[in-house]
Image (cartoon, grey):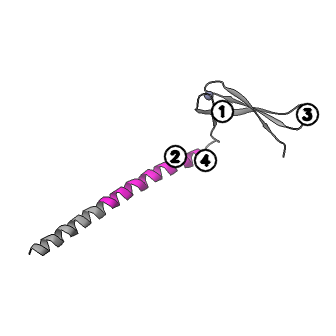
Amino acid sequence: MVVSWAIGWKLTKSIRDWGSAAWRRGKQIATLEERITKLEALLNGPHPPDVCKACGQRGVRQYKTEVSGTGNHIVQHWRCALCAYEEIRLGYPS
Ligand SMILES: [Zn+2]
């Protein structure tokens, strides 16, 4: 009788552990699905702004492009809509 109680206790503990692990996995999956939904919403909308080097928020967008005076570079003008930080990025024509 003592042996059967021990086996029953171990079996009960195993079932509880399995249930607890399954609940944690379910919660992880729900969290991942929520994160994926947010990322998909970002991808389906307009391209998100770049991160501003001055204020750290996503507010930097390009507002003007021109060719440099020498014609060797593309000059991009970027501005943060949140703090008005501006920067110039140089690129090479492809
Ligand atoms: Zn900014």
Q: Describe residue 6's horizontal placement relative to residue 83 as left or right.
A: left
| Disc 1 secondary structure class | strand
Question: Is residue 86 on the magenta stretch?
Answer: no
**On screen, residue 83 above or below 13:** above
Cα separation between marks 3 and 4:
38 Å
- Magenta-highlighted residues: 20-42
Mark number, residue 70 = 3
Q: Kindly give the residue lying farthest to the top in the view shown.
A: 84
Q: Nearer the viewer, mark 3 or mark 4?
A: 3
**On screen, residue 62 above or below 28:** above
Q: Are marks 3 and 4 in contact (CB under 8 Å)?
A: no
Which amino acid type is shown beneath numbered disc 1? Val
Which amino acid type is shown beneath numbered disc 4? Asn
Cα separation between marks 1 and 4:
19 Å
| Residue indicated by mark 4 | 44
| Residue drawn where x is 91% and y is 33% of the image | 70
